[in-house]
Amino acid sequence: TGFVPGDRVACTGGSGSGEFGTHTEMVFVPQNLVARIPDGVSYEEAAFATLGSIALQGVRQAELRLGEYAAVVGLGLLGLITVQLLKANGCHVIGMDVTDGNFELARKLGCDQCVLSDEGSVAAVEAFTRGNGTDAVLLTAATKSNEPMSRAMEFARPKSKVVVVGDVGLTIPRPLFFTKAI
C-alpha cells in the first residue's frame, strides 16, 4: 500500500526461503523492504541504500568514537562504504584485502593506510596503532575461509570488538577470543 505504478522505489532484502530484491519489471516486496526514492536522488544513488545501511549497521555495532582505530578487512564495495563511514565518524582506519586492486580508491575515500591481508598484516596493524591493536575490526570480506576471523583476533586489542558485516568463515579461535575478552 502507499505506492502506485510509476513510483520511483528502491527495494531489498531476503527472507529465508526467497529473495525479494530481484532485477525484474514487477516484484512483490514486503512493505518494510521498499522505500520511495526522494526527488533529486538518482536510481544509481538509491541502489546503494541497502549496502549503505549494512555498512552503517556494522559501524554502529562497533561503537567507535572519535580518534579510535579500526581495521576494515575486505575492501570491496561494502568495505569501501564502511571506510567512508568510519572516517566521517572521526576514526583512524587501516584497510586490508587479499589484493591491492582497491587500495588507491580506498585511500582516495579516506583510508589512512592499506595493506595486504597476509602474514605481514598483523605487524602493519601493530605499527598503525602504535602497538595497541584496533578498537574494532570490521570484517566486510566475502570468503568461506576462517582466516579473516583468525587475523581479526590478532589485530584487536583486549576488550575490543570484531563485527562481521560480510560473509566470512565463523570458526572463532577461542584462545585469543577468550584471553582478550573480545
Image: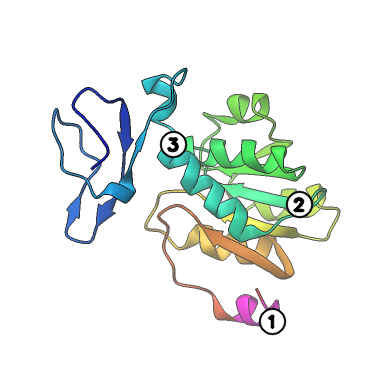
Q: Is residue 138 left or right of residue 11?
A: right
Residue 102 is situated, as x and y percent measured from the top left of the image, at 54, 29
Question: Vertical placement of 60 versus 46: above or below?
Answer: below
SS type, badge 1: helix
Q: Hey, what amino acid is under mark 2?
A: Tyr
Decide whether residue 176 is among the magenta residues.
yes
In this view, the residue in front, 176 or 8, is 8
Q: Quadrant of the N terminus?
A: top left
Image quadrant where residue 161 sits:
bottom right
Q: Hey, what amino acid is under mark 3?
A: Ala
First to last magenta residue range: 175-181
Name the main secondary structure of what is drawn in magenta.
Answer: helix
Of label 1 and label 2, which has the lower sequence position?
2
**Residue beneath the point at 60% across and 63% down:** 162
- Quickly name the residue at label 2: 69
Give the alpha-carbon distance from disc 2 to disc 3, as whole Å.
26 Å
Of label 3 and label 1, which has the lower sequence position?
3
Residue 57 is situated, as x and y percent measured from the top left of the image, at 53, 53
- What number is the disc on residue 179? 1
In this view, the residue in front, 87 or 138, is 87
Give the alpha-carbon distance from disc 1 to disc 2, as whole Å.
20 Å
Q: Nearer the viewer, mark 2 or mark 3?
A: 3
**Residue beneath the point at 14% across and 27% down:** 25
- Mark 1 crowd level (few <14, some 14–19, many ≥20, 10 Å Cα): few
CB atoms of marks 1 and 2 within 8 Å: no
- Quickly name the residue at label 3: 49
- Mark 2 crowd level (few <14, some 14–19, many ≥20, 10 Å Cα): many
